[in-house]
Image (spheres, grey):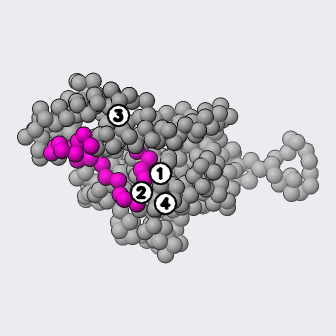
């Protein structure tokens, strides 16, 4: 995996969530610290900040990609900020250069949530080799899967600091340093978690890694077919891919022009379901989640762009095992619903 993305080091773990959790631990983030992340993500990104004892500071997104807005991040930096956690939403890389510039200027660490972004590139650099720490997910639905699983990539120093956090903080190496050779000896150097990847998961992952480029090509082809077919449908807005990135196309997030439809997003999804097409929503923003509203006081006024855009999102089926017939079926059905309920 380190070779594949061009990282100095890679550390296999039990989930994408675990990869983010040990990244925060390795970076020494804890109580009193603030970590800036985006409202357009799965709850795990913010949960790990909360579990570290730090405060998640949730900011708004850019209107085209729905990725974290670097200008909003800049406004949110305080004396207590320690890290920025961008999410490469749907597999489209966030704007890493301004985020890394901000991090340098304020002495922050960037920990990427790349759960969706294998394989993706940003200005010719592969995600996983760009920032100091980057977390991937190998959950069942992801572009590469080990059933459950994840990977942390990054610099030698930070990934080595993260390693003992995966196995109870156990250290057997000191023995070598101190000259003792007892096979049973170990020390516990920190209160680590238990989140290593098993050999069985790794065996699946190695085989998946060989197939990853072919999987990715298929995802690109399906996304291109959808975007071509929906380009002339006034009720639909297709996802963007900025010219300097290559998306991993983990998800295909369509946006509805609700003012040109007689039905809302929920009914659109229901009409697709009645025609045997399963769509979903990625994501209901964090500022709608009761825990984050109650504990961190989030509201729509914090994130006006996400508030507006999230209401008209839906994700169409996208995975490498879709046949051309399946893809045509999704296209025809989606166009039909848009046409049947056009205002
Ligand atoms: C954006 C994002 N971050 C993190 C995760 C967590 O990954 P995992 O399920 O491997 O813990 C997910 C999804 O599952 C995700 O979609």
Q: Is residue 128 left or right of residue 157?
A: left
The tag on residue 245 is 2
As measured in the structure, the alpha-carbon distance from the residue carrying label 2 to the one carrying label 1 is 7 Å
User: Which residue sits furthest bottom?
Assistant: 105
Mark 1 close to ligand 1, CB under 8 Å: no
As measured in the structure, the alpha-carbon distance from the residue carrying label 4 to the one carrying label 2 is 7 Å
Q: Please name the residue shown 24% across and 40% down the image.
A: 229
Q: Please name the residue shown 34% across and 34% down the image.
A: 317
Earlier residue among tags 4 and 2: 4
In this rendering, the answer to whether 332 lies above or below 12 is above
As measured in the structure, the alpha-carbon distance from the residue carrying label 1 to the one carrying label 3 is 19 Å
Q: Secondary structure at mark 1?
A: loop
Residues at discs 2 and 1 in contact (Cβ within 8 Å): yes
Earlier residue among tags 4 and 3: 4
Is residue 137 among the parts visible in the rendering?
yes
- From which residue to which does the magenta span run? 228-249
Q: Nearer the viewer, residue 325 or 268?
A: 325
Task: Kindly indicate the quadrant of the structure image that contains residue 6.
Answer: bottom right
As measured in the structure, the alpha-carbon distance from the residue carrying label 4 to the one carrying label 1 is 9 Å
> Is residue 179 a member of the stretch shown in magenta?
no
Mark 1 is surrounded, within 10 Å at the Cα level, by few (under 14), some (14 to 19) or many (20 or more) other residues, namely many
Mark 3 is surrounded, within 10 Å at the Cα level, by few (under 14), some (14 to 19) or many (20 or more) other residues, namely some
User: Which residue sits furthest left?
Assistant: 343
């Amino acid at each position: 995996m380190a070779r594949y993305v061009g990282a100095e080091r890679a550390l296999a773990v039990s989930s994408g969530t675990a990869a983010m959790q040990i990244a925060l631990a390795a970076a020494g983030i804890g109580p009193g610290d603030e970590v800036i992340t985006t409202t357009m993500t799965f709850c795990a990104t913010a949960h790990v900040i909360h579990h570290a004892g730090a405060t998640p500071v949730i900011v708004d997104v850019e209107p085209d990609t729905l990725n974290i807005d670097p200008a909003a991040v800049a406004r949110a930096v305080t004396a207590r900020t320690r890290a920025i956690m961008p999410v490469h939403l749907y597999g489209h890389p966030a704007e890493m250069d301004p985020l890394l510039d901000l991090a340098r200027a304020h002495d922050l660490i960037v920990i990427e949530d790349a759960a969706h972004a294998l394989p993706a590139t940003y200005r010719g650099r592969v995600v996983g080799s760009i920032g100091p720490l980057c977390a991937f997910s190998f959950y069942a639905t992801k572009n590469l899967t080990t059933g459950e699983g994840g990977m942390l990539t990054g610099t030698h120093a930070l990934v080595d600091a993260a390693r003992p956090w995966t196995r109870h903080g156990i250290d057997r190496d000191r023995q070598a340093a101190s000259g003792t050779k007892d096979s049973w000896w170990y020390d516990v150097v920190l209160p680590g978690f238990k989140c290593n990847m098993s050999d069985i998961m790794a065996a699946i992952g190695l085989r998946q890694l060989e197939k990853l480029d072919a999987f990715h090509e298929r995802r690109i082809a399906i996304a291109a077919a959808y975007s071509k077919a929906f380009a002339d449908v006034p009720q639909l807005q297709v996802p963007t891919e900025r010219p300097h990135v290559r998306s991993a196309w983990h998800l295909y997030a369509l946006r509805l022009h609700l003012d040109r439809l007689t039905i809302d997003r929920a009914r659109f999804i229901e009409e697709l379901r009645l025609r045997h097409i399963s769509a979903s929503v990625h994501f209901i923003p964090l500022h709608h989640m009761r825990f984050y509203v109650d504990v961190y006081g989030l509201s729509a006024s914090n994130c006006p762009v996400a508030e507006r855009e999230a209401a008209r999102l839906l994700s169409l089926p996208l995975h490498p095992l879709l046949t051309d017939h399946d893809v045509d079926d999704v296209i025809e059905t989606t166009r039909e619903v848009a046409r049947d309920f056009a205002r």
